[in-house]
Amino acid sequence: MARELHAVVAGGSIGGLAAALALRGIGARVPVFERSAGRIQARGAGVVMQPEVEYLLERLGSSAAAVSVPLRRRQRIDRQGKIRAYDAPQLMTSWDALYRVLHHALPADTYHPGSKLVETAEEGDSVVSRFADGRAVTCDLVIGADGIGSAARVSAGIPGAARYAGYVAWRGLEPESSISERVLLTLRDAFTMYAVAGLQFLTYLVPGPNGETEPGRRRVNWVWYMNVTPETLPHALASRDGTRYRTLLPPGQLLRTTRLSLLESARQHLPTVLADLVGASNVFMQPVHDLPLTRMRAGRVALLGDAAGTVRPHTASGTSKAVGDALSLAHALKDWDPATPLPVEQLGVWERERGRHLRTVAAAGTQLAERSALGIPHAPQFLKDL
């Protein structure tokens, strides 16, 4: 009889939860260690439903429809507010709606918040994970799902350095009931897009904070991509509490002066309906970074999601990529008896296939950004007065 596979997942966001659930599906014992002690900050807000996520939800007894808002059309709006629409049915969900389903599917005693990975070290036919709280866990395999600043990647000696892509994503996620009916009449039931050189704005409805999908209880999600120079970026990230944020300026931390500059930019450059939406929102911000793929595995450490490499958000594939990495990894390990040597051939196939997918999507994301002159040298820059 094969020995039970024991894996450790570092990172308790959607990718880490997906990895734990996929590996549990092949009979593995998989604790999840998340560095945040409280609620994890979402790296985004809205999520476009993709096949990998839909497949995982169905395996968990849920469905894409249960956690999504259905949209009927896509529409482009110009600076004067004129709209060109076309039919494009689509399901839109949210990071927290997915997180809730995946987290609920894991036994409570397998999820360990407030556990920051410090290092991994191979010892014979096992690998030890050490955490900042003094805990050490010996297992067969470590899954690094701990994001762009992955401690698992660094400890495993896998090279990788994130670089600023030259633009940021301002975001909002507001209760549908708090937005004026005039704005909602324009945006409801549609994926709305606006773009000029150096700016791109997208908005659509997603489920409410507790997964509500009924009209009036949903939320309006928006993202505004904007070229911001590397010199301006630290000022845009300056926070009310003095914390030096690098990858996400959380809601409530935007300086008053930054907000005023942002609202003035909205007034100057956006259609009125979108500027009004920005003005009604508790804005947060995420700089866009590129982490090119180098490797997805070293010894008994495997990386997935942003820990392995990033894709631009325009692809709407960040979440589905992490879930696809997790599902494929479980498939590669399904016949492995941990009492035997590491299945390097199967893991090699996994790494090549997922790496090829990552590079393809990453290249497509860069092309999509360049179409709106995002992250391009000499393109229009904004908020230079910060």
Image (cartoon, grey):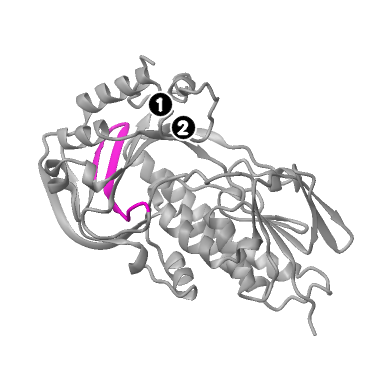
Q: Position of residue 131 (x, y in %)?
A: 75, 46
Q: Secondary structure at mark 1?
A: loop
Q: Nearer the viewer, residue 327 or 23?
A: 23
Position of residue 1 relative to residue 238, above or below, is: below
Q: Give the side of residue 138 with respect to residue 143, left or right.
A: right
CA separation in Å, label 1 and label 2: 7 Å
For the N terminus, the image quarter is: bottom right
Tag 1 residue: 254
Q: Give the side of residue 325 with respect to residue 29, left or right.
A: left
Q: Position of residue 163 (x, y in %)?
A: 55, 34
Give the residue type that dot 2 points to. Answer: Leu
Residue 373's quadrant in the figure?
A: top left
Residue at image point 22% right, 61% down? 88
Give the residue type that dot 1 points to. Answer: Leu
Among all residues in the image, which is located at the extreme bottom?
A: 1
Residue at image point 65% right, 41% down? 160
Q: Tell whether position 207 is magenta.
A: yes
Asked whether the beta carbons under mark 1 and mark 2 sit within 8 Å of each other, the answer is yes
Q: Position of residue 5 (x, y in %)?
A: 74, 71
- Dot 1 or dot 2: first in sequence order is 2
**Number of marks present in the image shown:** 2
Tag 2 residue: 249
Q: Which residues are magenta?
A: 193-209
Q: Give the side of residue 357 with respect to residue 117, left or right.
A: left
